[in-house]
Amino acid sequence: MPDALDLLATRRSSRIIDLVEPGPSGADLDTILTIAARVPDHGKLAPWRFLVLEADGRARAGAALAQVLKAADPATPDKRLEDEAGRFLRAPVVVAVISRAAPHVKIPEFEQLMSAAACCQNMLLAAAALGYGATWISEWPAYDADARAALGLAADERIVGFIYMGTATQKLEDRPRPDLSQVVTRF
């Protein structure tokens, strides 16, 4: 396992087109999800959950989204429907991180949402530590109520992101990062 600081300093999202089999094994995925759940969580609410799309579930989820598009616009081109049906087939494993943020007497909903976002980052780090490529994408289903319902979400749940995971066929060069003098102020 890489040194923790080296991992944090060098982790890079993979391109979705570069993610192939094998994806995380059952044990590796359980490790990734366990680490994803180790986030700041004021009040121990676990204001998030994970929807794992793997094996045939990826195709079923994509077909459900294609049906949502067809119902919304019967004139949707066949190519668009075909692309949608294959949405989750682009990587061996996809995990939807779902926010269950809700009004609370003590804990702001925004804090709960940030806990879910931290799950996404932990998932990326855990996947990288285990040698997998991963990327965090939201795309239209995260923002469409009918798409969320088709994936089994309750009306008050939101998708924070889809984490696509697999074996990266290419290691990407690092991209330019912000100069600290441009993003840090001191009081």
Image (tube, rainbow, N blue to C red):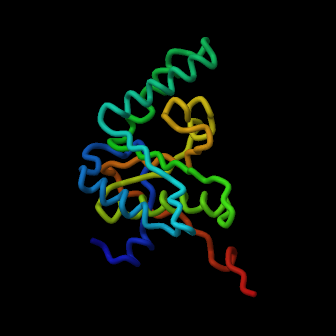
Which x, y percent locates residue 143?
63, 39
Q: Nearer the viewer, residue 115 or 133?
A: 115
Residue at the farthest front position: 105
Which x, y percent locates residue 173?
43, 61
The residue positioned 36% from the left and 41% from the top of the image is 91
The residue positioned 44% from the left and 49% from the top of the image is 50
Which x, y percent locates residue 181?
67, 80
Q: Please identify the quadrant where the N terminus is shown.
A: bottom left
Residue 174, compared with residue 60, is above or below; it is below
The residue positioned 51% from the left and 27% from the top of the image is 65
The residue positioned 38% from the left and 76% from the top of the image is 6
Q: Nearer the viewer, residue 98 or 171?
A: 98
Which x, y percent locates residue 9?
45, 73
Q: Quadrant of residue 74?
A: top right
Residue 179, compared with residue 139, is above or below; it is below
Q: Nearer the viewer, residue 136 or 67?
A: 67
Residue 29 placement, left or right of 82: left
Q: Quadrant of residue 155?
A: top right
Q: Please identify the quadrant where the C terminus is shown.
A: bottom right
